[in-house]
Image (cartoon, coloured by chain):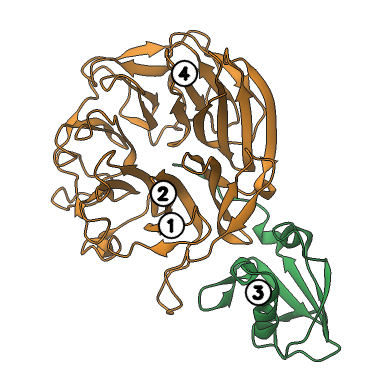
Amino acid sequence: MASRTLILLGTRKGVFTLELDGSREPGALSGPHCEAMPIQHAAWDPLRGAIVAGAGSPWYGPIVWRSEDLGRSWTQSSDGLSYGDDEDAPAVTRVWNITAVGDAIYAGVEPAGLFRSDDGGLSFRHVAGLRDHPSRPDWEPGAGGLILHTIVPHPSEAERMWVGISAVGVFHTADGGRTWETRNAGVPVAGSPDEDTEVGRCVHKLGLHPARPEVLYQQNHRGAYRSDDGARTWTSINAGLPSTFGFPLAVHPHDPLTIWTIPLNGDDQGRHMIDGRAAVWMSRDQGATWSAQREGLPQQGAFVGVLREAMAVDRHDPAGVYFGTSTGQLFGSRDEGRSWRLLADFLPGICSVEAVVLEG
Amino acid sequence: MAQLHVPRSLAALFPSVPRLLEIEADDVANLIRELDQRYPGMADRLCAPGPRLRPHIKVFVDKRFAALDTPLTSVSVVHIIPAVSGGSDRPIEG
């Protein structure tokens, strides 16, 4: 394996990068970058070979950082990340998700909305159709705020996309963002007695495999779910998991049936690893059965959490799996989760993990 | 011309910005407009839409709290100071 792997970490105090060599042995850790601003998501723009990172500075507001030299130098901008100057228009406070889709860069922000850049993240325009959805008066925030935190493009149909908003639910567009539909049937409401509402669903993370784009997986505040019809209807796949609560979810890069999630002990019980024993849970049959992966992970006293964007897979075979904790540990596996090791420690709380394979 | 003291953390976002500037402006809003002309994007760092000063950005003119409409003279001394209250990210859960 000649290719290197670059791990991108968005943390509460800036972006860090960790380079893994051809054997996926950890090398140099670099950071904190981006003036140690809180980074919700550091992502990769494959078209331009750039790191793009979404931030929210308490002082300086929402910012998209960008590096075209693997983190050695950075520029920042928030041009266009605004709902306008009207008195009633809310101020965008932070960027929660940054996702490259073809030659576009999408940003999900707080308060929940979607922006698109056609110049690599230098400037953005509001995808206004989403906030025009008639359900918006009923949108309520989750613990992280009213945030658009997940962006899942259709792999081959450029006009289609799913997004996740907490604590609102899943939306789908088939016309490039002009109009949107809620896609929450089968997922229970969180935090409301009104099961008839089309929103109120606390989606935590969505994933799909490009080979089966109508099959979506969802880690929700109230369990793990799968949809086989483009998110029109969802079915619980939580049986076999030790908890309904967790944040991240990852899909195997080569096997559409294999997924990982990290159950935590419960939304009102601390949101940490169950009994302080760290485990990643894997299903090889699209959620029908699950097994815990613990080898190499701490099995006592690990009262750590893992946030929604803080798990990633690489494209190697066997695939690497990585997760970062809200207390600054980065764990990695080179064998699809069978065994784990600590790759970095004593970092700021980790909000996002991405794994980029660099050829040559 | 008014004398402007630029905080370290703001200058770090615009590498060519000196920490001390002289700017011709008749109020704070126009000072920020002039800054944005010289250093595109700087107004976005200081102001939310409206525009209004961001909640944790404090501007002082001659050592007094100032607002966007605070007048400036040719001898005004302006400090932009990131408020102590903005020094910690709020807890993130999600």
Which residue is at the front of the view, B68 or B40? B40
According to the image, label 2 marks what residue?
Answer: A103
Residue, disc 1 = A118
Within 10 Å of disc 1 (Cα), the crowding (few <14, some 14-19, many 20+) is: some
Shown colour of chain B: green
Label 4: few (<14), some or many (≥20) within 10 Å? many
Q: Position of residue B83 (x, y in %)?
A: 70, 64
* Disc nearest the viewer among 3 and 1: 1
Mark 4 to mark 3 CA distance (whole Å): 45 Å
Left or right: residue A29 compared with residue A333: right
| Mark 2: amino acid | Asp
CA–CA distance in space, label 2 to label 4: 26 Å
Q: Please tell me which residue is depicted at 19% across the width and 29% down the height of the picture.
A: A236
The earlier-in-sequence mark between 1 and 2 is 2
Q: Residue at x 42, y 45 (%)?
A: A99
Q: CA distance from mark 3 to mark 1?
A: 23 Å
Which residue is more in the foreground, A279 or A177? A177
Q: Chain of mark 1?
A: A
**Where on the picture, by quarter, is residue B34?**
bottom right
Q: Which residue is mark 4?
A: A320
Q: Chain of mark 2?
A: A
Q: Alpha carbon of mark 1 to alpha carbon of mark 2: how far?
A: 7 Å
Q: Is residue B67 visible?
A: no
Q: Does residue A95 show up?
A: yes
Q: In the rendered structure, the residue with mark 4 lies on which chain?
A: A
Question: Helix or strand or loop: what does disc 3 sit on?
Answer: helix
Which element is circle 4 on?
Answer: loop
The mark found on residue B36 in the picture is 3
On screen, residue A342 above or below A223? above
Mark 1: which secondary structure?
loop
Q: Colour of chain A?
A: orange
